[in-house]
Image (cartoon, rainbow, N blue to C red):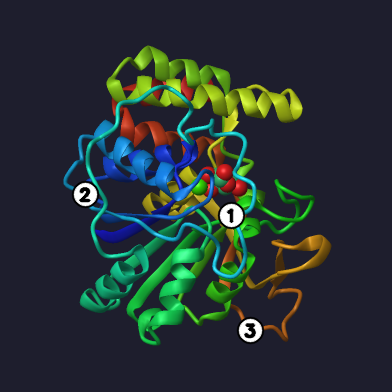
Amino acid sequence: MRKIIIDTDPGIDDALAILLALSAKEELEVLALTTVNGNVDIEKVTKNAFKILDVAGRRDIPVYKGNSKPLMRENSMPADCHGDDGLGNIGMEESGRVPEEESAADFLIRKAREEKGEITLVPIGPLTNIAEAIQKDPEFVKNIKEVVIMGGAIHEGNVTPHAEFNFWVDPEAAKIVFQAGFEKIVMVGLDATRYVWLDPALRELLYQINTPVSRFIHKVTRVYADAHWGYGQKLGCELCDVLVTAYLLDTSVLETTDAFVDVETQGLCDGASVVYPIWKYGDRQKNCEAAVKADTKKFFEIFFGYLFPEYLENVKKIQG
Ligand code: BDR
Ligand code: CA
């Protein structure tokens, strides 16, 4: 059983990543959600975290509120694909819960110390809280087992030609994380997430499955799919953050390469991850495993297999 803390800025794909993690009761123990400014502001993402836990029927999971702005710079533009409220504008009721008193970074530090070597960090938003924890506690990095990050890109960004959104919001934080010396980092970037595309047939299946969770996913992805249509007239949407959870459940869903990763913090390529594969740059010191590709069929079998196991055969038929 992996003990995980999801650091998140929900976020439509964040919501799906969290729901998938919570459905894997035998494999993943979700200790808490920590929130961070990103897709929308910190107040909205924190409210959204509670709403997602309500959908999953997991009001027992604590939420720790994190940073309201990047570590060393002012806020960037919010993402434009998650709706004004960050969760698809579907008019969900407020949960009525409030965050714990401790800040996200202080909680991360304390929990990592209490469960030394046991915790997998799962950041699926900007890396501000993780960088703050690194700066505040010299022992933090050693206390963490592994970090599986959604962010960055080897080849092409999604906010600028080179920068991916999570790194672009807080490049200094991302740089600190890669330089920190964690035992293991997996960078799940856009080179891999472009393989996990929820197409209209699979999205329709979610509607037909007709459970509260499947209908929620169908509804919440409406705005997200509209935004993707707006970018490139492509039907469907990319489930970036969800690939991280799928990897935790079955690592063979990703092909990775050992790499040295650095992050640009200024100029034209601000926020871009610079990825040196070790096979090519043997003089560099490996600091992560960078995802180069994902297995689409396997991903959707994991996604539906955990959330809606009785529909796995339908998924196989749709995927051909
Ligand atoms: C990342 O940006 C956000 O909009 C998504 O939630 C995801 O974490 C993809 O670049
Ligand atoms: Ca996210």
Nearer-the-camera pick, 96 or 141? 96
> What residue is at 55 percent from the left and 24 percent from the top?
223
Q: In this view, does 256 lie above or below 109?
A: above
| Residue 166, numbered label | 1
Q: In which quarter of the image is the N terminus?
A: bottom left
Q: Does the residue labelled 1 lie within 8 Å of ligand 1?
A: yes
Residue 160 location in percent, x, y? 76, 50
Determine the image quadrant of residue 167: bottom right
> What residue is at 38 percent from the left and 83 percent from the top?
137
Identify the mark nearer the N-term, 3 or 1. 1
Identify the mark nearer the N-term, 2 or 3. 2
Q: Outermost residue, top direction?
A: 208
Q: In this view, does 288 lie above or below 55?
A: below
Nearest to viewer (mark 2 / mark 3): 2
Say which amino acid is labelled 2: Ile
What residue is shown with label 3?
A: 285
